[in-house]
Amino acid sequence: MFGFLKNREKGRPDIVLFFTVFALAGTGLAMVYSASAVLSLKVYGDSFYILKRQLMWFIGGFALLMFFQELDYKVYLKATRYILPAAFILLICVFVPGLGHSAKGSSRWIGQAAIKIQPSEFVKVVMVIYLAKVFSAEHRSDKNQTVQVLLPLAVLAAMFVMILLQPDFGTAIDLVIVSVCILFVSGFSLLYLLGLFVLSVPAFYLFIYQVGYRWDRIKAYTDPWHDKFGIGYHIVQSFVAFRLGGLLGVGLGFGSMKIARLPEPHTDFIYAVIAEEAGFFGTAAVIILFCILFWRGARIALDAPDSFSKLLATGVTLMVVIQAFINIGVVTGSLPTTGVPLPFISYGGSSLWSNMICAGILLSISRFCETGKGKVGDFGTQEVW
């Protein structure tokens, strides 16, 4: 099995994708500083404190990107048997006293003090690798397709529940959406997708309607001004930031909403800070960068040499892009509020590292694409490094 992976020749990575990721991460550094300088000075006595931490995460993330770019994606086929149990253990560790760290009513982190990681961010990557393997044409057989679908979905359900218990509803939903997309692209019968849709109805009732604060967020989404100083406060303040920014924005660093009014300005609502300080053109530029990332990821998936790499490229691309548009949807009031960071831009090491790993995997696959030794589409025709 997977003998097709032998005797392959590496080409050059996708230069457009590389610089798109670099542009997003660079934008993140600038906006994290702008959004956090006042808070850093007030809490830590150093306006650069949060920026310094994000810069350290960025350097580590860039190293991860380069490492995974050079790592042949075929190693994941054997590594899955190790990284999947490790991912599940990490999710358990967040609930272990002394190992897990809680903040704002959530138990999502491992570690203490300045060094903490959020396992769910890396679990998403592991699940994409696992599902790409088990749903790939090279791994499947013609016998008992139902079992071949249900077993991976059972693993997905276990991971989903563990993430939901933290609670981290946004990450859990992101994981499910990406997993369903991988199942769809893999070519299994649409009846399985229909079955998942039917199961999602009682799941919606249990996980949203029966959980008070989540249902309140749904109601705030439909009419945030009904309780503009309560559950609707986040989105109302975000709307104000967009209104103040207008077309051109008030200028980088000159925004006022990030000072004690806009909640989580350097994490979940950093897109609203971009809206106020860079205006419509700034927010549009961010969306364009994510669209370019999606375009390059789609091209890599289409030109990938085998089913596993096609599904893997599809999964990691959608994992980043879907999370980005969930965050943008929340900040613009297009989706109910949920705690999902903006990939590459929001403050946070775990999110940045997991997204850098995804970019590295995509770049690695692009080096084996069928369009001329890593020349994906019309780009990558010159030696870059």
Image (cartoon, rainbow, N blue to C red):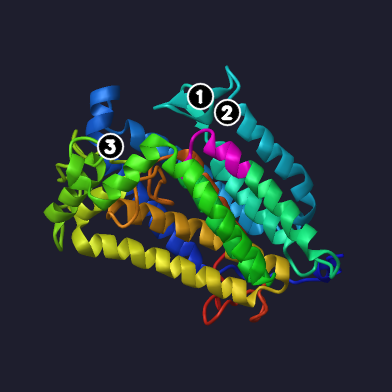
| Image position of 132 with respect to 43: above or below | below
- Image quadrant assignment for residue 110: top right
Badge 3, how many Cα within 10 Å: few under 14, some, many 20+? many
- In front: 161, or 314? 161
- Label 1: which residue? 101
Looking at the magenta stretch, what is its main secondary structure?
helix
Question: SS at mark 1?
Answer: strand
| Residue drawn at (16%, 52%) of the image | 251
Q: Where is the N terminus found, in terms of image quarters?
A: bottom right
Say what secondary structure mark 2 lies in: loop
Q: Which mark is residue 36?
A: 3
Task: Using the image, tell me which numbered label, if any, was put on residue 94.
Answer: 2
Q: Which amino acid does label 2 sit on?
A: Val
In front of the other: 263 or 367: 263
- Left/right of residue 129 with respect to residue 227 in the rendered view: right
How far from the left and from the top, in percent, is residue 70?
66, 57
Span shown in magenta: 159-169
